Image (cartoon, grey):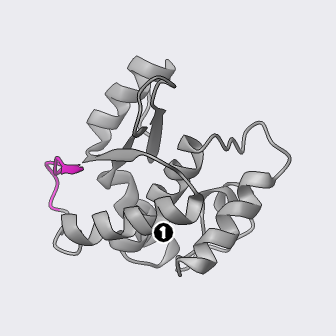
Amino acid sequence: MINIEPPSSSLDLSPLSKSGLARFLNRARAAVGLVGEVDVLLCSDAEIKRLNKAYRGKNKATDVLSFPAAKEAEGIAGDLAVSLDTAARQAAEHGHTLRDEVRVLLLHGLLHLAGEDHEADAGEMAARELELRRELKLPSGLIERAAGLVEKRR
């Protein structure tokens, strides 16, 4: 299920239909090979900051958080939270739509739910994300940006 808690800002959320995002989420989940349901919360920077502090001890907003389900939770892969405020800024910074940025963040989060960790591996998650972004026709991903492998569009 996809829950949208719109930020108090004046973001245009019209390109973010729940049905369209759900279709993408199901395609991406299948491409990742992730079994089980995924719940998504699209929220504000304030809400994701609260979640980041509560669950990761980091008192700052971020773009996407992944919460894998407990192993005994049958049929559930986990939860994702995406900041629409941060997604909108990143979309503008990288020259693509909010819809595409939310999809990039969903894919990144799904890879984390599948057990991938770009902070601890030797580039495997980055390679997998690149392959899946191409398959799903998405723009540059988070790992590439963090590594400085993508020029920012102006």
Q: Which residue is mark 1?
A: 93
- Give the residues drawn in magenta, as a range: 1-10
Tell me the residue at 26%/72% (across/down). 20
Between 152 and 70, the one lying in front of the other is: 70
Tell me the chief SS of the magenta region. Answer: loop
- Report x, y in % for residue 28: 48, 65
- The crowding category of the residue bearing disc 1, from other C-alpha atoms within 10 Å (few below 14, some 14 to 19, many at least 20), is few
- Report x, y in % for residue 64: 45, 46
What amino acid does circle 1 point to?
A: Glu
- Report x, y in % for residue 39: 31, 44
Tell me the residue at 76%/63% (across/down). 127
Tell me the residue at 15%/61% (across/down). 10
8 within the magenta span: yes
Q: Is residue 65 left or right of residue 82?
A: right
- Report x, y in % for residue 23: 32, 70
Tell me the residue at 48%/69% (across/down). 93
